[in-house]
Amino acid sequence: MPSLKTNCAGITSPNPFWLASAPPSNSGEQVQRAFDAGWGGAVWKTLGQPIQNVSSRFGAVRWRGNSGVGFNNIELITDRPLETNFREIYETKKKYPDNALVVSLMVETREEWREIIKRSEDAGADGIELNFGCPHGMCERGMGSAVGQEPKINERITSWAKEFSSIPVLVKLTPNVGDIVPHGLAAQAGGGDGVSLINTVKSIIGVDIDSFVPKPTVGGKSSNGGYCGAAVRPIALHMVASLSRDPRFNIPLSGIGGITNWRDAVEFILLGSSSVQVCTEVMLRGYRIVEDMNEGLLNYMRDHGFETLDDMIGKAIPSVADWGDLDLNYEIVAEINSETCIGCQVCLVACHDGAHQCIHADPDPNVRIPIVDLDECVGCNLCQIVCPVPECIQMVEVANGFSPATWNEHLGAGAQLRPKKGSH
C-alpha cells in the first residue's frame, strides 16, 4: 500500500490534506473534528490583533443552479481573543500530536512578530504561515497583500520570522501580482522554509441589480473581497507551476486554490506541491470530504506505481513549456462517433459561431450527425468541450509529414512550418 505521509518544509503529517487558514480552522473544536475526520493537518485561522468583522461576509457565483463554482469573502483575521486561540492550539496539538498544526500570523511591527511567533511556538505549533496574501481590509492597514505585493518587504519580514522562529516558516503568497516568481524568490531569499499559494483573488462577486449595491451587502454598501473556490484552480495551478519550474526556486510548496476532490489534489502535487490546503469545499460540504480525498489519492498512487508522495511531486513539470517551445507541426482533428452522437448539433453551432467553421450539417436534412471538414479543422477542441456526450468527439492526431518545429526554432534556424488551416 502506498504511503500518504507528507513532509512539507519540515512539517510532517499523516497525509497531504490540510485545512487552509479560514473559517473551517477557526477554533480548537473545529480543528479537532477535522482531524477526527481524517485531515492530515490544519493551518489555524490567521492570528493577529483581533478585529471586528462585518455582517454579511460571503458571496457566491451562481451558475446553472450551482452556487459553489466561485466564492467570495470579506471576512478578516480572527475576531477571537489571542489567549483563547493559543489555549486551543495547545490543547489540540497535545491531543493530536501526529497531525500538522500550523499557525497563520499577521501583525505589523518587528516586535509584534517576535512576540506572536514566540507564543505560537509555546503553544506547540509545528510551523507558522506568514499571511502575505489577504486582499481586503488588512491590506488597507499595511498588512496582507500589501506586503505580498512588495518583494523587498516580503523578504524583510520573512527574515524577521526566521530570526525569531525555531520551527518551519511558510510564506503565503498573494495571486494579485503580474508574476509570482519574484515573490516566491523573495520569500526564499528571506530564509522561508516553503511557500503557500495561492491566497484569494481580489474581486467583486456581483451586484444586486435592484438595489444597485455590490455583494455581499453590509448596510447598503460593500467592498472588494477575496475570490476562491473551484473557479480559481487554473490560476493557482499556473502559479504553482511557475515557481516549480524556475531553476532558482528550490523550497517546498503547499498548494492552495479550488481543490474540491482528490483529482484536483493530484494536479497540484504533480506540479510540485508537497501538501495541499482546502477551504471553500469544506465550507460548502463539510470535513468528511477528506475521506474520498484520502481514498482516491491512495488508489491513484497504487494504480500508477507511486509508493510515496515524493515519487509524484513535480512529475508534470518537465512537460510545462513556454509557448514558443511548443511543436507547431503537431496536428489533430476532430472525429465524431456516429454511433454515440445524439444529433444535438451543439458542436456545429459552436464551431460556426465561436471557432473555425469546419463542422457542417449533412446535406441530407434527415441526418442530424454533423460532418467535419478535415482540411479546415484546426484541432481547437471547442467541439469536444461543448459536446454533451462523453467521448463522442475525439481529437485524433494527423500524420502530416512535417518534422517537429517550434516557433523559436523557426525564428532561429528557419525550421519549416506546416501550412495554416482555417484561413479561408
Image (cartoon, rainbow, N blue to C red):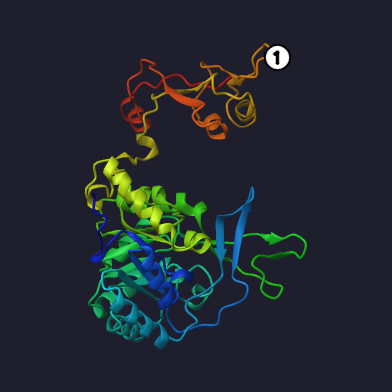
**Location of residue 284 in the rendering, given as x and y in whole percent from the top left corner:** 53, 61
**Location of residue 366 in the rendering, given as x and y in whole percent from the top left corner:** 69, 14
In the image, taking residue 291 as reference, residue 189 lies left or right, namely: left
* Image quarter hosting the C terminus: top right
Q: Residues within 10 Å of mark 1 (few under 14, many from 20)?
A: few
- Amino acid on which the number 1 mark rests in the picture: Pro
> Is residue 153 something that shows in the picture?
no
User: Vertical placement of 21 versus 375: above or below?
Assistant: below
Determine the residue located farthest toward the right in the rendered image: 210
Name the residue nearer the viewer: 177 or 358: 358
Name the residue nearer the viewer: 142 or 209: 209
Name the residue nearer the viewer: 223 or 76: 76
User: Vertical placement of 191 versus 399: above or below?
Assistant: below
In the image, taking residue 370 as reference, residue 114 lies left or right, namely: left
Identify the residue at image location x=63%, y=23%: 343
Residue 248 falls in image quadrant: bottom left
> Is residue 279 something that shows in the picture?
yes
**Location of residue 29 in the rendering, given as x and y in whole percent from the top left corner:** 42, 76
Residue 75 falls in image quadrant: bottom right
Residue with the mark numbered 1 = 365
Identify the residue at image location x=29%, y=40%: 303
| Callout 1 secondary element | loop
User: Vertical placement of 71 versus 146: above or below?
Assistant: above
Name the residue nearer the viewer: 318 or 368: 368
Identify the residue at image location x=40%, y=58%: 290
How many marks do you count on the picture? 1
Residue 30 falls in image quadrant: bottom left
